[in-house]
Image (tube, helix red, strand yellow):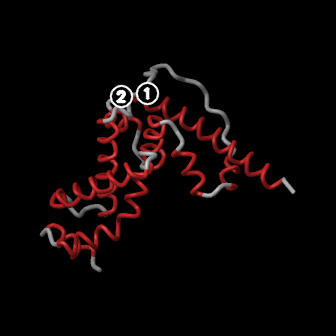
Amino acid sequence: MNEQLLIAGCKRGESWARKQLYELHAPVMMGVCMRYTNDRETAKDLLQDGFIKVFTKIGTYSETGSLGGWMRRVFVTTALEYLRRNDALKLSVNIDDYNEAMENVDVSALDQISADELMACVAALPEGYRTVFNLFAIEGYTHSEIANMLNIKESTSRSQFIRARKVLQKNVESLLMHENARQEKP
């Protein structure tokens, strides 16, 4: 179906268009929701809330960028609002002078695990780390933008990202050790 017809139908509030839009984009947007919350039921709630916002705000979509990109922003904002409401983004440490060097990351290790295993490692990060990691590494926001979104200092965003990478690296290494040990058993 032509995307312009679908958008026009959604702007007119037509149920067939809303259903089609939901069916086309729900799987990807559920993935976005799952990256910000580690609970499937909460992610389903965020998915519903996000689509309600998409349907009520579709009139503001200027059609200059991709519809999927615009929707992703709506869902990220919805997830962040949920996390803020539940104090999940309260970062325990506000660090201005965090300059600990990053350890060398063994990129070849990433070739040994699946995308699902890597996303499970990301999902296991503490909520504050996971949120900053998702916004920076996956969504592509700058630390300045993240600081504004989360109402934190830019240096705090940077330090949370560095810490998230370290924890993620340890989780991946642990997963690889476990996989290697399992493969070595007769």
**How busy is the neighbourhood of tag 1: few (under 14 within 10 Å), some, or many (20 plus)?**
many
Q: Secondary structure at mark 1?
A: helix
Q: Which mark is residue 40?
A: none
| 84 is higher (above) or lower (below) than 13 | above
Q: Identify residue type, mark 1.
A: Thr
- Mark 2 touches mark 1? (CB < 8 Å): yes
Residue 104 horizontal side relative to residue 33, left or right: right
Q: Which mark is residue 156?
A: 1
**Image quarter (top left, top right, bottom left or bottom right) of the N terminus:** bottom left
Please provide percent x and percent y for residue 131.
43, 40
**How busy is the neighbourhood of tag 2: few (under 14 within 10 Å), some, or many (20 plus)?**
some
Q: Residue at x 66, y 33 (%)?
A: 103
Q: Identify residue type, mark 2.
A: Ile
Q: Residue at x 35, y 39 (%)?
A: 83
Please provide percent x and percent y for residue 129.
48, 36
**Image quarter (top left, top right, bottom left or bottom right) of the C terminus:** bottom right
| 153 is higher (above) or lower (below) than 124 | above
| 71 is higher (above) or lower (below) than 125 | below
Residue sitting at the far left: 12
Please provide percent x and percent y for residue 163.
55, 32
Q: Residue at x 33, y 58 (%)?
A: 69
Residue sitting at the far right: 186
Q: Which residue is mark 2?
A: 152
Please provide percent x and percent y for residue 144.
37, 35
Q: Quadrant of residue 44?
A: bottom left
